[in-house]
Each structure stands twice: as structure tokens, then as C-alpha cells.
Image (tube, helix red, strand yellow):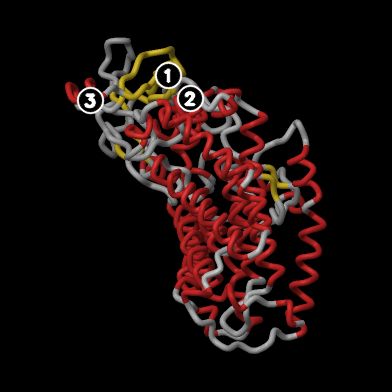
Amino acid sequence: MEWFTADAYWLSRLIFQRALAVLYVMAFLGAALQFRALIGERGMLPVPRYVARAPFRSSPSLFHLRFSDRFFALCAWTGCAVAVALLAGADGLLPLWGAMLLWLVPWALYLSIVNVGQTWYGFGWESLLLEVGFLAVFLGNDRVAPPVLVLFLLRWVLFRVEFGAGLIKMRGDACWRKLTCLYFHHETQPMPGPLSWFFHHLPKPVHRMEVAANHVTQLVVPFLLFTPRPVATGAACLMIVTQLWLVLSGNFSWLNWITIVLAVSALDLSPWHTAPEVAAAPVWYEVVVTAVATLLLAMSYRPVRNLLSRRQVMNRSFDPLHLVNAYGAFGSVSRVRQEVVIEGTADTVPREDSDWLAYEFKGKPGDVHRWPRQFAPYHLRLDWMMWFAGLSPAYARSWFGPLVERLLDDDGDTLRLLRSSPFPRGAPPAYIRARLYRYRYTTWRELRETGACWERTYVREFLGPTRIAPRAE
């Protein structure tokens, strides 16, 4: 079938595949380095406890068959190694069917992780990586030109990411309609970046222009993805520019980067390269791709219904394999930033005037003089969940108590998730408490005078002084 492939997108596919492999590396690296404290055998939300009550059909995963910290580490590092091989172009050295199987490996391994990751893996970009990763399996390698159906499905994902985010904003917080959300967002976003302070202090008319431009990019431009090449390429370029602006303004894991990668797949780069001659796609490949595309389009019914619903939900998976999902971000924007600060004391009788020392996190604000750093596309899962805890204790009900217990127990895996502990290894605190503070960015004058990028005010107690109960003899 002559229509089945599109030679003009040969280079776009190559860039897309290599960039997606980088995101897989980041995802598996984060899983390997953070899992023991979060979902390991002695983690805050252990996988064995979860799989004991969650049936396989609702959360298919290798870890239903067997789980140990060693086995999980093997899966995570294997995924990382395969992703590095894909980044190096290993798929191009294999026959078409072999390349497809190679791309299937990281998808299956990451699906196994996400489906037992519980709260720590409840973010929209997890499903997005899985949906895009599944499509990458059928995108082919250097032996065939990119299939038109898969390129279309990638644009369909990009459309839902952008248009879904645009609709959830217009249906959600009134500040999006008033163009005022960015008066607050750069200050109250989950994890600010090194430039977020400066973005916050842009003039208010600029913030209004940012929001207006965002609405155009998310509510109008996505439809242009399905127009002829020059227009579709221009639409994808606008999306890339918008996402790079978001990359500069905060830390949103790989959400912005995978959106950029999707947009790259829609670029017609044929004027800048000459596609190599490739063989016609084999019949079995055409049959498989056509069948998969038909299935995924049929499964798109529920995401489309969600887009059209007045009760639209964000970041919802409609099947346990995360093949077709609903997306969206920041339907509401916090006006005030509240941070949970965890402190410990060595005093055996805790008092208000005890020497309470704070634990510092890698990405979340703590010390008011410490400037935020750039971590994305790497994802600091505990730091993100601490932001949710500041919004409401309900978000932390399942894991905050276990976190405190592990800090009191001097757990090395948990401490490695932090930037620093005020207590030396082997000498944990006797008590830990948590306090809620309101954080705001300092002004230009305050920054010059104090060197602090944050100013904070005590709000209330989040958790009273707590210790590990003495064990019975």
C-alpha cells in the first residue's frame, strides 16, 4: 500500500525515537534510585502489600508474579540499559520485527512499575510515557519509512494532551478566563526551578499575555496538527516553543519534554535531509499496524467523551495497559504556597524551645536562602508529594506516617531521597515534628538585603512531636 508510509518524516521519526529513549532512561533511572524507600519491601507503600489486594487484571505487572527489592532493581536497570541501547540506535541494527520487540521491552517493564507504584506513580506523565511508548513499538526502524497511521496516532495523543489541558483550564479556575493565573502560578507551582522567581516578577501585563498565548496554543493550534504539512509543521513548532517556555519556568518532570518529543514527530523535516531508500513495508507489518491503529481509535471513545464532558477529569487511564488516556494540568491554581517542614530534635523531652533542626529536600523549598534547582526531566517523587501534603493532609495520609517512622529509624534509603539530614548517621532524632509554613517569593529589595529568595510565615502544626514507641521486651 503506497499510502501506508511517509518518507518525509524519516528524520522526524529518528529524532522522536532517540528523544523518547532519553525519557525512558530518566524514568527507569528514577525508579532504580528511589524505589526502595517508596515502594520497596520496607518502603512507605510496599509493593507486596499492594499486590496482595489488587488483582492482576486491574494492574497487570511482573511484580504480581514475584517481588523482591533485588528483582525490582533488576527490572529497572534492565529498562535503563535497553533505553540506552535504543538511544544508541540498536533498533536500527535489527530486523523490523526485532526492533519492535526491543521497543516493547521498556514499555512492558515500565508498565509493570507504574501499575504497582500507587500514589508515587499517579501522575499524568506516567500514562503519557506508556501511551507514547506503546506507539513507538509500531513506528518501525531504518528498514521502513514511518507508517502514516502511527504518525497520525502520535498527533492524536498530542492533540489530547494540549486540548485537554486547555479545556480543563477554561472549565476550571476562573483566573484562567480572567488571564490572571500566572500572577500566582510561578510561586505556587509544585516544584519551582531556578528561573521561577524571575518569571513570577514579570509585569502583570506580560503574565496576561502568557495566559492568552497559552489558550491559543492549547485550544486552537491543536486542530492545525491535522492540516497539510506546512501548517501542521508550524503548529508543532508553536507547541515546542510554548513547552520550552514552561521548561524554563519550572520543574514538571518529563511532561513538557515528552510533549516536545510528540511535536517533533509532526515536523516535516524533508527540506533539510534526504531520506534513504528503504524497502516497502512487509504485508505482516501493514496488517499489524492497521489492526493496532483501529483498536486504539476505537478505545479513544472514552477520552473523547471526557473531553466533551462538563465534568472533565484530568489524567485518567481508562484501561490497565494505559493505551489511551485523558490528560490535563492545573485546572485550578493555588493562590498561596504552603510547605510542610519536617524537623527533629535529640532532646528526650521535646519542648517548644528544644533545638529543632530541619530536614532539607532536594527540590522542594525549605531553607529560604536556598535557590531552587533544575531537576526535570528527572522526577523527585517524594518532593512532589510533599507539595500535595501542603495543600491538604489527606494527600499524605497513606505515606507521611511511614516517612516519619523511617526518619526516626535512621533508614538509609529514605535519607538518600533528601538533600541533607541535620543528624549524623547512627544518631537519629528522638522526636520528629512537622510544621506548616506559608512561603512567598521575596521582592527585589528583600532579595538584595537578605539574599533570601523566600520569606515564610508559620501557619500551624502539621504533626506534633512524634517518636517510635518503645519495643516490648
| Residue 71 against residue 88 in the figure, above or below | above
Residue contact between numbered discs 2 and 1, judged by CB atoms under 8 Å: yes
* Label 3 SS: helix
Indicate the amino acid at tag 3.
Leu
**Cα distance between the residues tagged 1 and 3:** 23 Å
Kindly identify which numbered label has been placed on residue 447.
Answer: 3
Q: Residue 463: percent from the left, percent from the top?
A: 46, 19
Q: How many marks?
A: 3
| Residue 323 against residue 209 in the figure, above or below | below
* Label 2 SS: helix
**Cα distance between the residues tagged 2 and 1:** 7 Å
Question: Mark 2 Cα within 10 Å, few/some/many (few <14, many 20+)?
Answer: many
Query: Which image quarter is the N terminus in?
Result: bottom right
- Residue wearing tag 1: 436
Kindly identify which numbered label has been placed on residue 182.
Answer: none
In-image side of 185 versus 171 (left or right): left
In-image side of 262 versus 159 (left or right): left
Residue drawn at x 42%, y 24% is 339
Quadrant for residue 165, please give it.
top right
Which is nearer the eye, 276 or 57? Answer: 276
Residue drawn at x 76%, y 75% is 288
- Residue wearing tag 2: 390
Of callouts 1 and 3, which one flags the residue occurring earlier in the amino acid sequence?
A: 1
Which is nearer the eye, 335 or 457? Answer: 335
Question: Mark 3 Cα within 10 Å, few/some/many (few <14, many 20+)?
Answer: some
Which of pointers 2 and 3 indicates the residue nearer the eye?
3
| Residue 396 against residue 433 in the figure, above or below | below
**Cα distance between the residues tagged 2 and 3:** 24 Å
Which of pointers 1 and 3 indicates the residue nearer the eye?
3
